[in-house]
Structures are given as C-alpha cells and as structure tokens.
Amino acid sequence: MSYTAFLILILIVAIALILIVMVQNPKGGGLSSSFGGGGAQSLGGVQNTNNFLDRTTWTLAITMFALILLANFAIPRGGDSNFKLDNTLDGIETTTPAKTATPSTNDSLK
C-alpha cells in the first residue's frame, strides 16, 4: 500500500472518530438520551447506544494508531537523490543584510 493511501485512510478514520466523539455526551445526554429516555432499558435503548458508541470509539482509535504505525513503514525512503529539501536548498542564494551603524544605547547615555 502506498503512503498516500495510508494518509487518506488516516484522514477518514480521524473524521469518523471526531464525529463519534461529538455525538457522545459525558453527562448522559447526547444521542443516547434521544433513544429510550430516562430509565427505560428497551431493545436499542440507552445502554445499547452507549455500548455501541464506546466500542466504535475504541475501534476507531485503535485503527488510527495502527494506520499511523503502518504508514511509518510506507514512507518513501531512498538515497540522497530522493531527498528534495537538500536539492531545493542548493539552488537558494543566501544573503545577509548589511549591518547599519546605529548608536548603541550605552553611547547615548554618556
């Protein structure tokens, strides 16, 4: 798998993880309060929704961790010919600005 494919998968998992976390509400509200209400534990009720969101969050987090580790091995590495930063910096001329003669603060106090 190429590095670009890993980056795309990581972005998709990250967006899904953000959405799942935003749906949850730590105070008992959120999506789980919309299904079933207060203490009703019916099929597909509050407890099942919380379990689903919790399992989905952990699954996406573990998937993202694994994708990031695998992407590290997919980074294209080569000799000096593939390192573009050195090639780019070789063509840039560096100039230093000329220093201007400004009186120092100690000279002005005398």
Image (cartoon, rainbow, N blue to C red):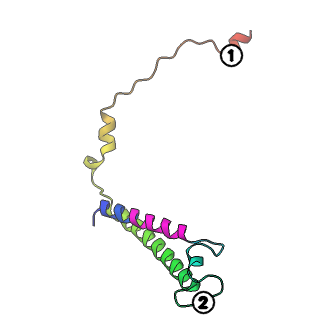
Q: Amino acid at mark 2?
A: Gln
User: How far across and how far down the image is residue 62, in percent?
Assistant: 46, 74
**Magenta span has 75?**
no
Q: Magenta-highlighted stretch: main secondary structure?
A: helix
For residue 6, side relative to residue 107 (left or right): left
Q: Nearer the viewer, mark 2 or mark 1?
A: 2
Quadrant of the rendering where the C terminus is positioned: top right
Quadrant of the rendering where the N terminus is positioned: bottom left
Q: Residue at x 36, y 61 (%)?
A: 7
Q: Which mark is residue 41?
A: 2
Neighbor class of circle 2 (other Cα within 10 Å; few <14, some 14-19, many 20+) is few
For residue 56, side relative to residue 94 (left or right): right
The image quadrant of residue 75 is bottom left
Q: Residue at x 31, y 59 (%)?
A: 4
Q: Amino acid at mark 1?
A: Thr
Q: Residue at x 48, y 71 (%)?
A: 61
Q: Which residue was labeled with disc 1? A: 105
Give the extent of the magenta segment: 11-23
Relative to the observer, which residue lies in front, 66 or 104?
66
For residue 83, side relative to residue 16 (left or right): left
Seen from this angle, which residue lies furthest top? 110
